[in-house]
Image (cartoon, grey):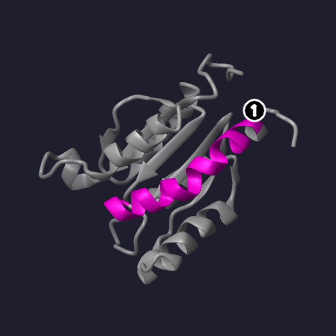
Amino acid sequence: MTDPAGRSDRSAAVITVSTRAAAGVYADKSGPIIADALRSAGFEVDEPVVVPDGEPVAEALRRAVAEGYAVIITNGGTGLNPNDHTPEMTRSVLDREAPQLAAAIARYGVDHGVPTAVLSRGTAGTAGSSLVVNLPGSSGGARDGMAVLVPLLDHAISQIRGGDH
């Protein structure tokens, strides 16, 4: 199946949200972890795009949705820091939220020894024919999030794009 923009159900975009990485202060470490996990699951993935937090997140998300990616995953900007705005930017793009998906990602972290995983404000949902998910910016949070997501992606994409249960 393809979406109206012509992208396949196996297409994915990764958006790293880090003001410092976008400024070249340090390299993006979690974006490549997510991209590699998606590739291992059979997805076509471009290199992660790195943007500063704030409105550039919403712009990158809108662009990825318009380009028809089946899966769009952000990482970073989901904490309690006053400069973390990724969930708000994501909600401005979403058509529908999937709160239990975001909760499952946090729960997985807690269940695997990271009690602070519940402090993530990440969200998940649909925008157009895309599944959009916020993951934490840490390498461990990226790995944990992908452990939850990979087994669900095919079913979620099928549902979003009109498949049967």
Which residue is denoted by mark 1 in the rendering?
Answer: 161
Residue at the (78%, 40%) spot, across then down = 159
State the extent of the magenta-drawn residues as a range.
Answer: 137-158
Q: Nearer the viewer, residue 46 or 146?
A: 146
Provide residue 26's location: percent of width, then percent of height: 14, 52
Provide residue 86's location: percent of width, then percent of height: 44, 57
Q: Residue furthest top?
A: 6
Reply above or below: 133 against 80.
above
Provide residue 115's location: percent of width, then percent of height: 45, 83
Q: Residue furthest front?
A: 40
Left or right: 149 in relation to 29? right
State the image quarter where residue 163 is shown.
top right
- Residue 51 is one of the magenta-drawn residues: no
Provide residue 66's location: percent of width, then percent of height: 56, 27
Where the N terminus falls, by quadrant? Answer: top right
**Observer able to see residue 93:** no
Left or right: 120 in relation to 71? left
Residue at the (57%, 46%) spot, across then down = 132
Where the C terminus falls, by quadrant? Answer: top right
State the image quarter where residue 39 is shown.
top left
Q: Residue furthest right?
A: 164
Disc 1 residue type (three-letter): Arg
Magenta segment, principal secondary structure? helix
Badge 1 marks a residue whose secondary structure is loop
Reply above or below: 160 against 144.
above
Q: Residue furthest left?
A: 25
Residue at the (34%, 32%) spot, across then down = 47
Query: Count the marks: how many?
Result: 1
- Residue 146 is one of the magenta-drawn residues: yes
